[in-house]
Amino acid sequence: MNRKELQLIAQRVAQKKEQLSREKLPIPEEKELIKEVVGEKIEKESFTAPPVKKIEEGIAPSLIYPQNLSSVITPDIKKTLQQLIEIALEKGVEPAITLARKTGNAFLLDTFRDELAFKYYSKLKELKML
């Protein structure tokens, strides 16, 4: 896992806590703050790179507009999520976000954010950076 990225995420979480405290607003759980930070990275990447419909080689195809949620978590989606998480942890969030956006699947991108936030939370807690 990229230690520099972990430090940046931990710093951003601390900034968010400090800002909320100054504004006398309730401070959400750290898991939620990490999800917000990862979501901000996804939004930032969304503004800098237009969506591409072409699916990169090695990334499983996505489902678009499923009829029900039980049909969404297919082996292909699970495989894609795992690949994206591995890329994010090894190479950084931005390359993984770029690939996730190329699928054109908003559900996948949202699920990726949630899963990645959980991984970062666990690692930050383990390293006592939170």
Image (tube, rainbow, N blue to C red):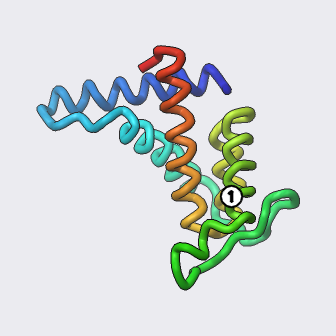
127 up-or-down from 22: above or below? above
Residue furthest to the left in view is 24
Residue 120, by quadrant, is: top right
Q: Residue at x 46, y 45 (%)?
A: 40
Of helix, strand and loop, which one carries label 1? helix
Q: Quadrant of the N terminus?
A: top right
Q: Could you tell whether 116 is left or right of 21 in the image?
A: right
Q: Position of residue 69 (x, y in %)?
A: 52, 74
Q: Residue at x 73, y 64 (%)?
A: 75
Q: Is residue 115 left or right of residue 32?
A: right
Q: Is residue 68 left or right of residue 12?
A: right
Residue type highlighted by circle 1: Lys
Residue 97 visible in rendering:
yes
| Quadrant position of the C terminus in the picture | top left
Outermost residue, front side: 70
The part of the image, by quadrant, that contains residue 37 is top left
**Dot 1, crowdedness within 10 Å: few (<14), some or many (≥20)?**
some
How many numbered markers are drawn? Answer: 1
Q: Where in the figure is residue 81, as x and y percent of width and height?
A: 67, 53
What residue appears at the point 55 percent right and 66 percent down from the top-left corner? 107
In percent of width and height, residue 123 lies at: 55, 26
Residue extending farthest to the top is: 128
Rendered location of residue 10, percent (x, y): 45, 24
Q: Residue furthest bottom?
A: 67
Q: Is residue 13 above or below residue 110?
A: above
Q: Which residue is mark 1?
A: 78
In this rendering, position of residue 39 left or right of residue 48: left
